[in-house]
Image (cartoon, helix red, strand yellow):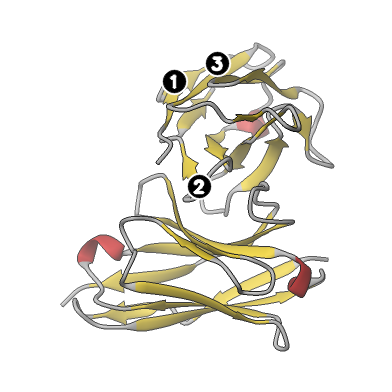
Amino acid sequence: DIVMTQSPDSLAVSLGERATVNCKSSQNVLFDSNNKNYLAWYQQKRGQPPKLLIYWASIRESGVPDRFSGSGSGTDFTLTISSLQAEDVAVYYCQQYYSTPYSFGQGTKLEI
Amino acid sequence: EVQLVESGGGLVQPGGSLRLSCAASGFSFSRDAMHWVRQAPGKGLEYVSGITSNGGSTYYANSVKGRFSISRDNSKNTLYLQMGSLRAEDTAVYYCANSLAIGAHLKDWGQGALVTVSS
């Protein structure tokens, strides 16, 4: 099974500053035949279900603010929030869907 | 509007069984793959199980293989998770989610159903 490891476990960033969350997979999640990385990012606010932010490693879900961006390929990925807003306080998870069973990172708690 | 509504959660004794349901609306249920993801209190997300759109293939985490069974009824737009031989470590909020296919991101999520395994 693929193991996903995020860093850091928690992060404190000032309002308006950049936040960066890293995710590393134990195996390559880039499918050569379509050149897609099978990697998504989710945001979970306290008391709420997870919400899809980014898929195929860099495609922003409809309605997600453009301050959120995803990058990386193969085994190393990054979620960047360019200018942190108060409503971005949450736990962020990466997930691979390259092979079943899908797997999530342990989560990164983002605080102000 | 997409809606996924889980039900069937509750308190069950160790070794017992429980069946969760997820009622879907607002999208073409029979076209989408479906999944269960759980979250133990204060912990992260754990993928539990998935099923293809026609129910022909199913997938399980090692932690639940042989004890849990996923199924769906496309005529009722409903997903199920039959849980057996329950353990304290199965205590969690169980979310259902959809994806366009197996091998696609989880797009929409329900609010979750709490399962507590305790004597």
Q: Residue B62 appears in which quarter of the rendering? A: bottom left
Residue furthest toward the top? A17
Instruction: Name the amino acid type tagged 3.
Output: Val
Instruction: Name which of mark 3 and mark 2 comes first in the sequence.
Output: 3
Residue picked out by circle 1: A7
Q: Residue A4 appears in which quarter of the rendering? A: top left
Q: CA distance from mark 3 to mark 2?
A: 30 Å
Q: Looking at the picture, how far across and down is residue B98, in whole percent?
A: 67, 60
Element marked by disc 3? loop
Instruction: Name the amino acid type tagged 1.
Output: Ser
Q: What residue sits 54% from the left and 22% below the top?
A: A112
Same-chain check, marks 1 and 3: yes
Residue picked out by circle 3: A13
Instruction: Name the amino acid type tagged 2.
Output: Tyr
The answer to whether residue B44 shows anywhere in this view is yes
Crowding at label 3, few (<14), some or many (≥20) Cα neighbours within 10 Å? some
Residue picked out by circle 2: A102
